[in-house]
Protein backbone atom coordinates (compact mmCIF):
# COMPACT_ATOMS: atom_id res chain seq x y z
CA UNK A 1 0.00 0.00 0.00
CA UNK A 2 1.09 3.57 -0.67
CA UNK A 3 2.79 4.65 2.58
CA UNK A 4 1.97 8.32 1.98
CA UNK A 5 -1.70 7.48 1.49
CA UNK A 6 -1.98 5.42 4.66
CA UNK A 7 -0.15 8.11 6.66
CA UNK A 8 -2.52 10.75 5.20
CA UNK A 9 -5.46 8.59 6.31
CA UNK A 10 -4.05 8.21 9.82
CA UNK A 11 -3.41 11.95 10.17
CA UNK A 12 -6.95 12.72 8.99
CA UNK A 13 -8.46 10.26 11.46
CA UNK A 14 -6.32 11.63 14.29
CA UNK A 15 -7.45 15.17 13.46
CA UNK A 16 -11.09 13.98 13.66
CA UNK A 17 -10.31 12.23 16.95
CA UNK A 18 -8.41 15.20 18.35
CA UNK A 19 -5.37 13.16 19.36
CA UNK A 20 -3.27 10.07 18.75
CA UNK A 21 -5.14 7.05 17.42
CA UNK A 22 -4.12 4.31 19.86
CA UNK A 23 -5.95 1.54 17.99
CA UNK A 24 -4.41 2.28 14.58
CA UNK A 25 -2.99 -1.28 14.43
CA UNK A 26 -6.57 -2.55 14.44
CA UNK A 27 -8.02 0.10 12.10
CA UNK A 28 -5.25 0.70 9.53
CA UNK A 29 -5.12 -2.86 8.12
CA UNK A 30 -8.80 -2.63 7.15
CA UNK A 31 -7.89 -0.26 4.30
CA UNK A 32 -6.57 -1.07 0.85
CA UNK A 33 -5.35 1.19 -1.93
CA UNK A 34 -7.53 1.68 -5.02
CA UNK A 35 -7.12 3.76 -8.15
CA UNK A 36 -9.87 5.24 -10.33
CA UNK A 37 -9.33 6.60 -13.81
CA UNK A 38 -11.00 9.85 -14.80
CA UNK A 39 -14.70 9.13 -15.46
CA UNK A 40 -14.76 5.83 -13.55
CA UNK A 41 -17.59 5.24 -11.06
CA UNK A 42 -17.38 3.97 -7.49
CA UNK A 43 -21.09 3.25 -7.59
CA UNK A 44 -24.02 3.84 -9.93
CA UNK A 45 -27.65 4.38 -8.99
CA UNK A 46 -29.36 1.05 -8.35
CA UNK A 47 -26.18 -0.69 -7.15
CA UNK A 48 -25.32 -1.68 -3.59
CA UNK A 49 -22.37 0.35 -2.29
CA UNK A 50 -20.26 -1.31 0.39
CA UNK A 51 -17.02 0.71 0.63
CA UNK A 52 -15.96 3.48 2.95
CA UNK A 53 -13.64 5.63 0.78
CA UNK A 54 -10.93 8.08 1.81
CA UNK A 55 -9.65 10.33 -0.99
CA UNK A 56 -5.87 10.52 -0.91
CA UNK A 57 -5.66 12.33 -4.27
CA UNK A 58 -8.26 13.40 -6.80
CA UNK A 59 -11.84 14.62 -6.96
CA UNK A 60 -15.14 12.73 -6.84
CA UNK A 61 -18.62 13.97 -7.58
CA UNK A 62 -21.96 12.72 -6.34
CA UNK A 63 -24.70 13.21 -8.89
CA UNK A 64 -28.25 12.21 -9.74
CA UNK A 65 -30.07 11.81 -13.03
CA UNK A 66 -33.22 13.92 -13.22
CA UNK A 67 -36.45 12.84 -14.92
CA UNK A 68 -35.05 13.94 -18.30
CA UNK A 69 -31.80 12.00 -17.84
CA UNK A 70 -29.71 15.12 -17.13
CA UNK A 71 -26.93 14.92 -14.57
CA UNK A 72 -27.42 17.05 -11.46
CA UNK A 73 -24.41 17.41 -9.18
CA UNK A 74 -25.05 17.16 -5.48
CA UNK A 75 -21.51 17.41 -4.12
CA UNK A 76 -17.81 17.30 -4.85
CA UNK A 77 -15.30 15.58 -2.58
CA UNK A 78 -11.56 16.17 -2.79
CA UNK A 79 -8.28 15.18 -1.15
CA UNK A 80 -8.60 14.39 2.55
CA UNK A 81 -12.36 13.85 2.51
CA UNK A 82 -14.39 10.66 2.81
CA UNK A 83 -17.45 9.30 1.06
CA UNK A 84 -19.30 6.42 2.60
CA UNK A 85 -22.65 4.66 2.45
CA UNK A 86 -24.95 5.10 5.42
CA UNK A 87 -26.24 1.61 4.75
CA UNK A 88 -24.64 -1.19 2.78
CA UNK A 89 -27.95 -3.03 2.41
CA UNK A 90 -30.01 -0.80 0.14
CA UNK A 91 -29.47 0.32 -3.43
CA UNK A 92 -27.93 3.75 -4.05
CA UNK A 93 -30.10 6.52 -5.39
CA UNK A 94 -27.07 8.43 -6.74
CA UNK A 95 -23.85 7.97 -8.70
CA UNK A 96 -20.27 8.66 -7.59
CA UNK A 97 -17.72 9.33 -10.31
CA UNK A 98 -14.07 10.39 -10.40
CA UNK A 99 -13.49 13.69 -12.19
CA UNK A 100 -9.75 13.08 -12.46
CA UNK A 101 -7.37 10.25 -11.68
CA UNK A 102 -8.13 9.45 -8.06
CA UNK A 103 -6.33 7.46 -5.38
CA UNK A 104 -8.54 6.04 -2.66
CA UNK A 105 -8.06 4.07 0.50
CA UNK A 106 -11.11 1.84 0.94
CA UNK A 107 -12.47 -0.47 3.61
CA UNK A 108 -15.64 -2.49 3.93
CA UNK A 109 -18.26 -0.24 5.52
CA UNK A 110 -19.95 -3.04 7.49
CA UNK A 111 -16.65 -4.14 8.99
CA UNK A 112 -15.81 -0.59 10.07
CA UNK A 113 -19.30 -0.02 11.40
CA UNK A 114 -19.10 -3.22 13.48
CA UNK A 115 -15.76 -2.06 14.87
CA UNK A 116 -17.49 1.01 16.29
CA UNK A 117 -19.23 -1.06 18.96
CA UNK A 118 -15.86 -2.34 20.23
CA UNK A 119 -13.57 0.58 19.38
CA UNK A 120 -14.49 3.90 21.00
CA UNK A 121 -11.87 5.74 18.96
CA UNK A 122 -13.38 4.60 15.67
CA UNK A 123 -16.90 5.38 16.92
CA UNK A 124 -15.76 8.95 17.72
CA UNK A 125 -14.03 9.35 14.33
CA UNK A 126 -17.11 8.03 12.53
CA UNK A 127 -19.37 10.44 14.44
CA UNK A 128 -17.10 13.39 13.60
CA UNK A 129 -16.97 12.38 9.93
CA UNK A 130 -20.78 12.24 9.85
CA UNK A 131 -20.98 15.68 11.47
CA UNK A 132 -18.59 17.09 8.84
CA UNK A 133 -20.66 15.59 6.01
CA UNK A 134 -23.87 16.94 7.52
CA UNK A 135 -22.42 20.46 7.86
CA UNK A 136 -21.11 20.36 4.29
CA UNK A 137 -24.56 19.38 3.00
CA UNK A 138 -26.30 21.97 5.17
CA UNK A 139 -24.04 24.77 3.88
CA UNK A 140 -24.76 23.94 0.27
CA UNK A 141 -28.48 23.56 0.88
CA UNK A 142 -28.65 26.94 2.63
CA UNK A 143 -26.82 28.58 -0.28
CA UNK A 144 -29.15 27.05 -2.85
CA UNK A 145 -32.26 28.06 -0.92
CA UNK A 146 -31.25 31.51 0.30
CA UNK A 147 -28.61 33.03 -1.99
CA UNK A 148 -28.84 34.45 -5.48
CA UNK A 149 -26.77 32.98 -8.32
CA UNK A 150 -23.86 35.40 -7.91
CA UNK A 151 -23.60 34.77 -4.17
CA UNK A 152 -23.66 31.01 -4.79
CA UNK A 153 -20.86 31.35 -7.36
CA UNK A 154 -18.70 33.49 -5.05
CA UNK A 155 -19.32 31.03 -2.21
CA UNK A 156 -18.23 28.15 -4.46
CA UNK A 157 -15.02 30.02 -5.36
CA UNK A 158 -14.24 30.55 -1.66
CA UNK A 159 -15.29 27.09 -0.49
CA UNK A 160 -13.76 25.07 -3.35
CA UNK A 161 -10.87 27.12 -4.81
CA UNK A 162 -9.07 23.98 -6.03
CA UNK A 163 -12.17 22.85 -7.96
CA UNK A 164 -12.76 26.16 -9.75
CA UNK A 165 -9.62 25.50 -11.81
CA UNK A 166 -10.15 21.82 -12.60
CA UNK A 167 -13.88 21.32 -13.09
CA UNK A 168 -15.59 21.90 -16.43
CA UNK A 169 -18.00 24.83 -16.36
CA UNK A 170 -21.11 22.65 -16.82
CA UNK A 171 -20.19 20.65 -13.66
CA UNK A 172 -19.98 23.82 -11.55
CA UNK A 173 -23.18 25.19 -13.11
CA UNK A 174 -25.06 21.99 -12.23
CA UNK A 175 -23.80 22.12 -8.65
CA UNK A 176 -24.88 25.76 -8.27
CA UNK A 177 -28.27 25.23 -9.88
CA UNK A 178 -27.63 27.58 -12.82
CA UNK A 179 -27.16 27.13 -16.55
CA UNK A 180 -23.65 27.16 -18.07
CA UNK A 181 -24.57 30.44 -19.83
CA UNK A 182 -25.51 32.05 -16.50
CA UNK A 183 -22.26 30.79 -14.98
CA UNK A 184 -20.27 32.33 -17.85
CA UNK A 185 -21.98 35.64 -17.21
CA UNK A 186 -21.27 35.43 -13.48
CA UNK A 187 -17.61 34.64 -14.10
CA UNK A 188 -17.29 37.52 -16.57
CA UNK A 189 -19.01 39.98 -14.20
CA UNK A 190 -16.70 39.01 -11.35
CA UNK A 191 -13.54 39.29 -13.49
CA UNK A 192 -14.54 42.80 -14.56
CA UNK A 193 -15.08 44.00 -10.97
Image (tube, rainbow, N blue to C red):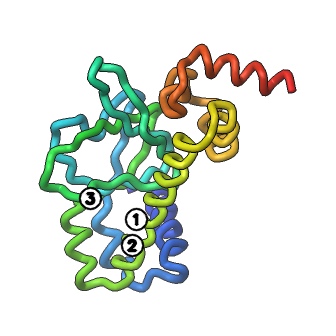
Q: Residues within 10 Å of mark 3 (few under 14, many from 20)?
A: some
What quarter of the picture does the N terminus occupy? Answer: bottom left
In the rendered view, would you say 127 is above or below 36? below
Q: CA distance from mark 2 to mark 1?
A: 5 Å
| For residue 183, side relative to residue 9 (left or right) | right
Identify which residue is drawn at 47% across, 32% down: 100
Q: How many marks?
A: 3
Q: Please state the horizontal and vertical placement of residue 36, each as a whole percent of the image.
A: 36, 37
Callout 1: SS: helix
Give the answer, above or below, for where 56 lies relative to 21: above
Q: Residue furthest front?
A: 146
Q: Tell me: 178 left or right of 22.
A: right
Which comes before the other along the chain, label 1 or label 3? Answer: 3
Tag 2, which secondary structure? helix
Residue bearing the label numbered 1: 130
Left or right placement of residue 113 versus residue 186 in this view: left
- Find residue 56 and report its horizontal and vertical position in percent: 48, 51
Query: Dot 3: what SS?
Result: loop
Q: Are marks 2 and 1 in contact (CB under 8 Å)?
A: yes
The residue that disc 2 covers is 127
Q: Is residue 129 above or below residue 64?
A: below
N-terminal-most mark, 2 or 3: 3
Q: Residue at x 31, y 34 (%)?
A: 41
Would residue 126 appear left or right of 59 to someone viewing this image? left
Q: Which residue is mark 3?
A: 86
Percent across and percent down for residue 124 are 40, 79
Q: CA distance from mark 1 to mark 3?
A: 9 Å
Quarter of the image with the C terminus is top right
Amino acid sequence: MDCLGIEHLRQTFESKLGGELKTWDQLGPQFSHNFLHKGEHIVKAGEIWRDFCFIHEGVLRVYYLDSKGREVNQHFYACGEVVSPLSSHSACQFNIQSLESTQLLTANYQTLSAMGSENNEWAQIELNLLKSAFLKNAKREARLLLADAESRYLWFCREYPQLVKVLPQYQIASFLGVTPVTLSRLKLNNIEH
